[in-house]
Image: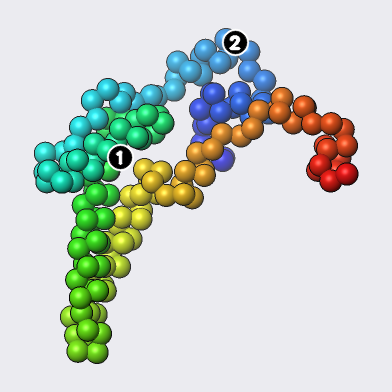
């Protein structure tokens, strides 16, 4: 990632760059870490979405992804997803040939809300692919524990 500074812990874990203790300390002092001690649902969310907010937010805080400043991003996801679900239910009630004009309009709205929800979900690591990007690389010591034959032939002996 050219131009993007990686977190110090990730640089250390990758093991590709040797940092002195002083360099590690200096880098960590410069890193910005947003607090996550007051993650609360925005007031505009209805009760049922606030409950969902609390559920998802607690999981994201637990894995260290969400901070206080991310509350609106999660709320936007919940609103878009809620609208997507409502429109999808309406579409399922329609008779395709009889309600073609209504169906077309609802499909446009459904697509719009799906895209909004998907983009927000990716930003919040709520999708499988976005979480896969968060996976830390394996420690090099795990590779050293393999036998020479496994390293050469990938375990196919």
Instruction: Judge whether residue 66 can be spotted in this image.
Output: no
x, y percent for residue 119: 36, 53
- Tell me: residue 17, above or below residue 120: above
Residue at 24% from the left image edge and 61% from the top image edge: 85
Rendered location of residue 122, percent (x, y): 40, 49
Q: Is residue 37 above or below residue 131?
A: above
Q: Residues within 10 Å of mark 2 (few under 14, many from 20)?
A: few
Query: What is the distance, in whole Å, between disc 1 and disc 2 at their CAs?
Result: 37 Å
> Which one is in front, 19 or 147?
147
Residue 137: image location, x then y, percent: 61, 34
SS assignment at label 1: helix
55 vs 20, left or right, is: left
Q: Is residue 157 left or right of residue 125?
A: right
Q: Which mark is residue 16?
A: none
In this figure, which residue is indicated by the disc labeled 2? 21
Residue 2 higher or lower than 6, as above or below? below
Q: Which residue reaches farthest bottom?
A: 97
Quickly name the residue at label 1.
56
Where residue 76 appears, as percent x and y from the top left, is 24, 48
Position of 108 compared to 121: left or right? left
């Amino acid at each position: 990632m050219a131009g993007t500074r990686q977190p110090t812990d990730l640089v250390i874990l990758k093991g590709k760059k040797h940092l002195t203790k002083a360099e590690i300390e200096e880098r960590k002092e410069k890193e910005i870490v947003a607090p996550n001690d007051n993650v609360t649902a925005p007031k505009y969310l209805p009760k049922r979405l606030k409950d969902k907010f609390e559920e998802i937010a607690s999981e994201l805080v637990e894995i260290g992804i969400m901070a206080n400043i991310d509350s609106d991003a999660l709320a936007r996801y919940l609103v878009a997803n809620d609208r997507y679900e409502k429109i999808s239910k309406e579409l399922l009630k329609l008779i395709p040939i009889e309600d073609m004009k209504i169906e077309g309009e609802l499909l446009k709205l459904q697509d719009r809300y799906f895209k909004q929800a998907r983009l927000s979900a990716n930003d919040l690591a709520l999708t499988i692919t976005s979480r896969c990007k968060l996976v830390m690389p394996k420690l090099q010591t795990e590779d050293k524990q393999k036998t020479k034959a496994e390293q050469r032939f990938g375990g196919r002996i």
